[in-house]
Amino acid sequence: MTTSKPILVTGATGKTGVRIVARLRAAGRPVRIGSRRASPAFDWEDRSTWAEALDGVSAAYVAFQPDLAAPGALETVTAFFAQAVDSGVRRLVLLSGRGEVEAEQAEEALKASGADWTILRASWFSQNFSEADFLDAVLSGEVALPVGPIPEPFIDVEDIADVAFAALTEPGHSGRLYVLTGPRALTFEDATREIAAATGRDIRFVSVPAEVYRAALVELEQPPEVVDLVLYLLTTILDGRNTSTADGVQQALGRPAGDFSDYVRRTAATGVWGASDA
């Protein structure tokens, strides 16, 4: 799809959004930043900001914050889809969550919107270990989470960004649902062990009861709605329903998804985990 019209990237400062923006700019494509700090501003919680952000846009990447499983998310994204279509946006690419009933409801709303749609249904991000989320735990030497020995095929966010870029700028992705996972499933203990080996640090994984983890989040003064959402994602989504791998990256890009070990080696080299080869 060749156009001089801008592409709106919502969640433009998030893990996927910042990478998609970089790819679009590198390709010389006009980008509109979907952020509360951008000009024009875009705020999921303030619908009055949507019209200006969508004005003249040819396509949009939709990454709802904080998560499609959050209360009110379905109503909000459904309204956004309708307004985008009414504004003349031709293509919508939705970041969805694997194994989330609420996310699948959002997918159905997108399909019914009349837009030229592509859905990226992603598993847990590898980058959760290095960009916020679990980074402090890794740095502390103990990753304590309310999850058991359930394997998860972590997806490299770089792969998500590559698929999103293709879906936003190239033909052939209309009406496609890509299930994006890594090529193998690891438990959180396996993942932590790989990070420890790559950094030469003593980092261990500890499975803790959900109520203990909830108390820790409350002690950190996290809002109740955030605590509920985090516990839902950790205890419900990671119940084994998402253990199987999928070939969405191969389907979209003609190449396999990156392995978790590749992500670990690349990330350890940055020093973000306090890597030491000594």
Image (cartoon, rainbow, N blue to C red):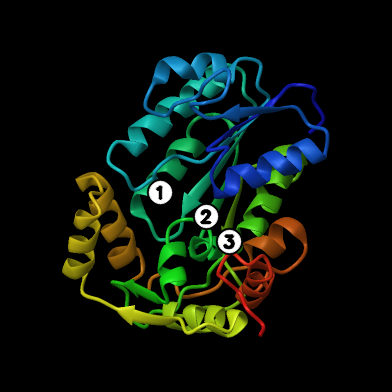
Amino acid of disc 3 = Leu
Which residue is drawn at the image coordinates 75% and 38% (left, top)? Answer: 24
Q: Which mark is residue 180?
A: 3
Mark 1 residue element: helix
Which residue is drawn at the image coordinates 27% and 60% (left, top)? Answer: 231
Residue furthest toward the front? 278
Describe residue 41's horizontal placement relative to residue 219 as left or right: right
Q: Position of residue 88 (x, y in %)?
A: 62, 18
Within 10 Å of the Cα at label 1, are there few (<14), some (14-19), or many (20+) other Cα atoms? many
Amino acid of disc 1 = Ala
Mark 1, residue position: 103
Q: Nearer the viewer, residue 139 or 20?
A: 139
Q: Nearer the viewer, residue 40 or 153?
A: 40
Q: Position of residue 94 (x, y in %)?
A: 54, 42
- The image shows residue 194, relative to residue 210, as above or below, that is below
Quarter occupied by the C terminus = bottom right
- Do residues under tags 2 and 1 come within 8 Å of each other at their CB atoms? yes
Q: Position of residue 52 (x, y in %)?
A: 55, 14
Amino acid of disc 2 = Arg
The disc, 1 or 3, on the residue closer to the chain's N-terminal end is 1
Give the Cα distance between marks 2 and 1: 9 Å
Within 10 Å of the Cα at label 2, are there few (<14), some (14-19), or many (20+) other Cα atoms? many
- Do residues under tags 1 and 3 come within 8 Å of each other at their CB atoms? no
The disc, 2 or 1, on the residue closer to the chain's N-terminal end is 1
Mark 2, residue position: 121
